[in-house]
Image (cartoon, grey):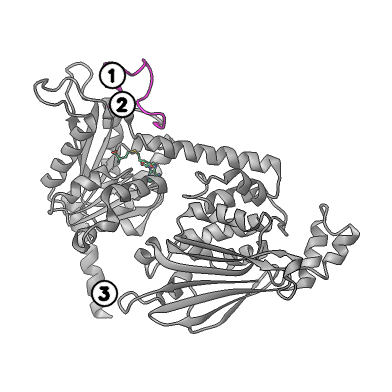
Amino acid sequence: MFLTIGTTGTPERPATDLGFLLHKHPDRAQAFSTSHGTAHVFYPEASAERCTAALLLEVDPVALVRRGKGKGKGRGGAPDAALAQYVNDRPYAASSLLSVALATVFTSALSGVCRSMPERAGAPLPLRIEVPALPARGGAELVRKLFVPLGWERVEVTAVALDEQFPEWGDSRYVRLVLEGELRLADALRQLYVLLPVLDDAKHYWVAPDEVDKLLRAGEGWLADHPERPLITRRYLSHRWGLTRQADQALELVRLAESDDLDVDSVDNAVDESTDTEEKPVPLAEHRRTAILEALRGAGAHRVLDLGCGQGQLVQALLKDVRFTEIVGVDVSMRALTIASRRLKLDRMGERQAGRVTLQQGSLTYTDKRLKGYDAAVLSEVVEHLDLDRLPALEYAVFGSARPRTVLVTTPNVEYNVRWETLPAGHVRHGDHRFEWTRAEFRAWAGKVAERHGYTVAHLPVGPDDPEVGPPTQLAVFTLTDTEIDKKTDKKTDKKKEAEAA
Ligand code: SAH
């Protein structure tokens, strides 16, 4: 069982970085023992221009047969199954076993983690993946249907003849697959991890309920929207209906949440009729961006995080002002990021402009080293998208760990909802809002956050400030207190001194 992963590079960005991203050194051949045999990783080529890693799984047929028997369940008993043990294709073909090996050997790469090169791991690479013998139930056509929607530029699938000398015997159940395109390495590996067993459709290990979680994790960012999703979940979970239904429901929720993001806060995009009727009325979303930009300028921020950036409208506005030298948009939704990147025309942007902006996928409920050291972070209409019990995790990740000098948080003021004509009484403004706060509730939360993490907080109205119910959007400006800033600089100087002393 065999597959290769290759990339190309330049002297500045050598292809051999692949070794760091896979956490496997190009100069060494390494062997790992897995539950089905030995997995070998080696590099047939490794230069700055081209680097290819090969994963070869040497299956231990005896272990395979024993495992198969031990797990029982319909396999191994029938006479043809007994024969199958000896004419088994497992040792040669890339199947579910290779997928298990992939996850065992490249665990960190699969999760997208690379401490030494985080920005390389987070960015698409020119990749070439080849699987010379891929068992494909459903044939070349299904292989294409599975890989074409995933963003590869080239998906080449060639049927492999049963016997080249006897073409009249027709094709075997194998195809040769070549994928080429610019993808994040982790995304490519996750696709293979799920789709190899799907194509094989003969899982050799027991499908446990935690397979649903594994599938959801590996499918993040690509599976929910995949046109062949029902087939993928069904086959991946070995046709176990209960599990398939569970996975489908979870993926449907992901898809709905993501398609909801497409009309982010649709009520807010409604025109604010109360502004001067002589001029063109201004949508609330625009009021919000203006307020955020002003607050950022007031804080003297240059390097800015847009956390939960959605489709990138704020990133676009920030780019127009040269004082913002570094802009990082973060979102959990791949789909939103794809739309953002299209909106910004990232691929056609000049080098200097492109150097100012990064879009990255990440969840704000986990601490993330990439977010440290910025002047300011914006959370525009994001907190209300989280379940209340996840809010402390976001609080820690932003105020405790990333800890920028300024944090701006905007959120709807639920008291104002009675002023929206289109909003039925008692409804939140957007299907994905988990809650909406009154002014007092927001102030109470913000006050506690500030106190816990050494910030001061000021509140500003956004949009027309109604004398009775307040403004439609509330903005909190958090500023790190001077003592906390001193502590931060002290820590840095201490580290520097330590380094000098060493
Ligand atoms: N900031 C944008 C988008 C707000 S919509 C604006 O003001 O228009 C909320 C966004 O938060 C969505 O894009 C959603 O994908 C993102 N989001 C929700 N939960 C998140 C999480 N845990 N981590 C990162 N982003 C998240």
Crowdedness of circle 1 by 10 Å Cα count: few (<14), some, many (20+)? some
Q: Nearer the viewer, residue 163 or 400?
A: 163
Give the quadrant of residue 134.
bottom right
Q: Give the range drawn in magenta.
A: 413-433
Q: Quadrant of ligand 1?
A: top left
The image quadrant where one finds the C terminus is: bottom left
| Lateral position of residue 67 relative to residue 333, left or right | right
**In terms of sequence position, does the residue under pointer 3 or pointer 2 come before the other?**
2
Q: Which of the numbered marks, if any, corresponds to residue 498?
A: 3
Q: In this view, does 337 lie above or below 199?
A: above
Quadrant (top left, top right, bottom left, bottom right) of the N terminus: bottom right
Could you say which is closer to the camera, residue 47 or residue 303? Answer: 47
Q: Name the residue under label 1.
A: 420
Q: Residue furthest bottom?
A: 27
Amino acid at the residue labelled 2: Val
Q: Tell me if label 1 and label 2 are in contact, CB under 8 Å.
A: yes
Task: Report if the beta carbon of the residue with label 2 is closer than 8 angstroms to ligand 1.
Answer: no
| Disc 3 packing (10 Å; few <14; some 14–19; many ≥20) | few
Relative horizontal placement of residue 463, taking residue 52 as reference (left or right)? left
Residue at far left of view = 278
